[in-house]
Image (cartoon, rainbow, N blue to C red):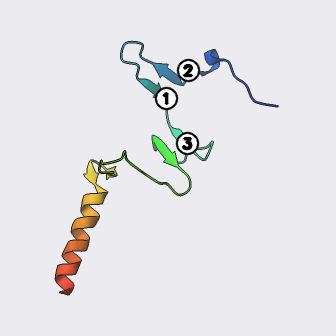
Amino acid sequence: MANNREASQFNSVVHVNDTTAQVGIANSVGINTTTPQGSYSLYVQGTSNVTGAINSQTDVQVGGVSITATASADATALAIALG
């Protein structure tokens, strides 16, 4: 049997701004888990795949720093160092 819930049961954790259509979820969100670990806003358990739209650059940032750009720069520096 499905665990059906009424929308009113989620009012304490889901917030919708009718003006901007933004949706917020209180506390933290777990993906592939019902028990997010630590104090992370987003906790993903398992392998993740990040893709972008066609003809756009996909980027992952940590603390506002591009991991993609950093990895590319590190690979270039290593290639130069190894000659």
Q: Are marks 3 and 2 in contact (CB under 8 Å)?
A: no
* Quadrant of the image occupied by residue 66: bottom left
Q: Mark 2 points at which residue?
A: 12
Q: Mark 1 points at which residue?
A: 26
Residue at the image point whose x is 23% and y is 78% from the top: 78
Residue at the image point whose x is 28% and y is 65% from the top: 71
Query: How dense is the environment of label 2, judged by Cα within 10 Å: few (below 14), some, or many (20 and up)?
Result: few
Q: In this view, does 65 lie above or below 41?
A: below
Label disc, if present, on residue 66 of the rendered structure: none
Query: How dense is the environment of label 1, judged by Cα within 10 Å: few (below 14), some, or many (20 and up)?
Result: few
Inspect the image, locate mark 2, and give the three-letter code of the amino acid beneath it. Answer: Ser
Frontmost residue, 47 versus 29: 47
Frontmost residue, 24 versus 37: 24
Inspect the image, locate mark 1, and give the three-letter code of the amino acid beneath it. Answer: Ala
Q: In this view, does 63 lie above or below 12?
A: below
Residue 57 pos. (x, y %): 29, 51
Quick one: SS at disc 3? strand
Number of numbered labels in the structure image: 3
| Alpha carbon separation for disc pair 1 and 3 | 12 Å
Q: Name the residue under label 3.
A: 30
Inspect the image, locate mark 3, and give the three-letter code of the amino acid beneath it. Answer: Gly
What residue occupies the far front of the structure in this picture? Answer: 55
Residue 68 pos. (x, y %): 30, 59
Q: Is residue 77 visible to us here? A: yes
Q: Are marks 1 and 2 in contact (CB under 8 Å)?
A: yes
Quick one: SS at disc 1? loop
